[in-house]
Amino acid sequence: MGVSPVWVRVPPSAPVMAQIKIRNFLAKDLKRIIEIEKKSFAEAWPDSYLEKLSQKYPNDFVVVEVAEKVVGYALGRLKENGVGSIKMLAIDPDYRRQGIGKELIGFLVNRLKENGVKEIFLKLRTSNNVANKFYATLGFEMVKTIEKYFPNGDDAYLMRIRI
Ligand SMILES: CC(C)(COP(=O)(O)OP(=O)(O)OC[C@H]1O[C@@H](n2cnc3c(N)ncnc32)[C@H](O)[C@@H]1OP(=O)(O)O)[C@@H](O)C(=O)NCCC(=O)NCCS
């Protein structure tokens, strides 16, 4: 998918939401993304997997910056079967509950919509209460449970949003 970064630039004294910038992943972001991943998940993906995803989907992997600092990332792509998929999402714990995750997913949803996507799927741990609440707030619905989906044996909810 072709991507244009979204720029929202105002003076640093403005509220955090007014300062965010969403742009495509660059190789220099990998270290920071690995750091946020480890801060965010007890079962973090291996560094090599994050690197592989960023190399495989360079146009679908996006980061969000606040005052030029990367504070979160997500991967949202159009799959070969024509549906959208959100594969990764994390916001640095120091920047949560300020609407940044919502803005980031909103950006990916809009971009997929512009590319003709009608529904988007994602999988998340059934035990991840915060993410379950977060996605429900955005309008995602649970489709089914996939038992032992994750490498450690955790179950996943398959979630969907029609757009
Ligand atoms: C899930 C996550 C991305 C949310 O990011 P965020 O920037 O804090 O979310 P937002 O501020 O945009 O929240 C939007 C809404 O989601 C819900 N929500 C978010 N965090 C919540 C929490 N801790 N408890 C309850 N509801 C929550 C709220 O309804 C919130 O709106 P409100 O703040 O006006 O009440 C973030 O908590 C995170 O990175 N978690 C660890 C990684 C993870 O679980 N990723 C998703 C699975 S792959």
Image (cartoon, rainbow, N blue to C red):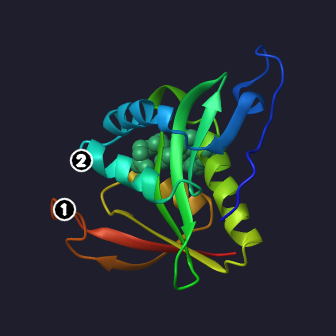
Taking depth in this image into account, of 41 and 117 the one nearest to the observer is 117
In the foreground, 69 or 102: 69
Q: Is residue 149 above or below residue 9?
A: below
Q: Residue 8, how many percent across, how many down? A: 80, 35
Specify the amino acid type for callout 2.
Glu
In the image, residue 86 sits, relative to residue 73, either above or below, namely: below
Q: Which residue is mark 1?
A: 151
For the residue labelled by badge 2, is the local secondary structure a helix, a strand or a loop?
loop
> Residue at the bottom extreme?
81
Verify CB contact (< 8 Å) between mark 2 and mark 1. yes
149 on left or right of 129? left
Image quadrant of residue 9?
top right
Q: Position of residue 91 (x, y in %)?
A: 50, 38
Instruction: Check the picture and name the quadrant holding the N terminus.
Output: bottom right
Residue plotted at (54% across, 31% down) = 71
Decide if residue 81 is in sight here. Answer: yes
Q: Which mark is residue 43?
A: 2
Please provide percent x and percent y for residue 99: 65, 40
* Identity of the residue drawn at 71% across and 55% down: 3
Return the disc, 2 or 1, that comes first in the chain's sequence: 2
Vertical side of 81 occupied by 44: above or below:
above
Few, some or many C-alpha atoms within 10 Å of disc 2 (few <14, some 14-19, many ≥20)? few
